[in-house]
Each structure stands twice: as structure tokens, then as C-alpha cells.
Image (cartoon, grey):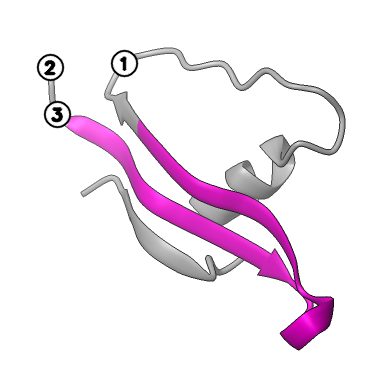
Amino acid sequence: MSEQAIVCRGVLKNFGAGSDAVRVLRGVDMDVRYGEMTFLVGPSGCGKTTLLSVIAGLLNPTGGDLAVLG
């Protein structure tokens, strides 16, 4: 199968508002196909858990496009 299970295009996530806002995700682009294993690797605090939370629907993205399972 070559269909996409997850598609992220320019996904942004800010915490806070106005001048106090902190941008945690900055234009994330990612494709994950059905049956494919994908690993997120990076230092503590780089946004791995935030990205997974946005993909899972636990957090709303500030911007960009996200499609999961369709």
C-alpha cells in the first residue's frame, strides 16, 4: 500500500498568545504511509511530544494542514 496514513504540511503550534507566544512547531512537513514505521528523534524540548499530540488530536495546531487516516 502506498496510501498516506498521516500527512502534515506546514504544521505550526504556538503556546501562549501575543508577544508571549512560543512557537514550538515551525512548518512541519511529514508523510507516513500505511504500514511504515517512523521514528521521531531529537533532543529534549524540541517538540516531539507536541507533534504527536497534534497528530493524535489532543492539541489543535496553530496553523498548517494535517490529515490522519484520510
Location of the N terminus by quadrant is: top left
Q: Amino acid at mark 2?
A: Met
Residue 17, numbered circle:
none
Residue 36 picture quarter? top left
Q: CA distance from mark 3 to mark 2?
A: 6 Å
Q: Write the residue at 30% across / 42% down.
A: 7
Front-lying residue, 33 or 63: 63
Residue 31 position, x and y percent, is 31, 31
**Tag 2: Cα neighbours inside 10 Å, few (<14), some, or many (≥20)?**
few
> Magenta stretch mostly in which secondary structure?
strand
Q: CA distance from mark 1 to mark 3?
A: 10 Å
Q: Amino acid at mark 1?
A: Gly
Residue 15 picture quarter? bottom right
Residue 3, numbered circle:
3
- Do tag 3 and tag 2 residues touch (Cβ < 8 Å)? yes
Residue 35, numbered circle:
1
Q: Which residue is farthest bottom?
A: 18
Front-lying residue, 9 or 70: 9
Front-lying residue, 19 or 33: 19
Q: Establish if 54 lies above or below 44.
A: below
Q: Write the residue at 74% across / 86% down.
A: 18
Q: Which residues are magenta?
A: 4-30
Visible in this render: residue 69? Answer: yes
Q: Which residue is mark 2?
A: 1
Lateral position of residue 6 relative to residue 26, left or right: left
Residue 32 position, x and y percent, is 34, 27
- Do tag 2 and tag 1 residues touch (Cβ < 8 Å)? yes
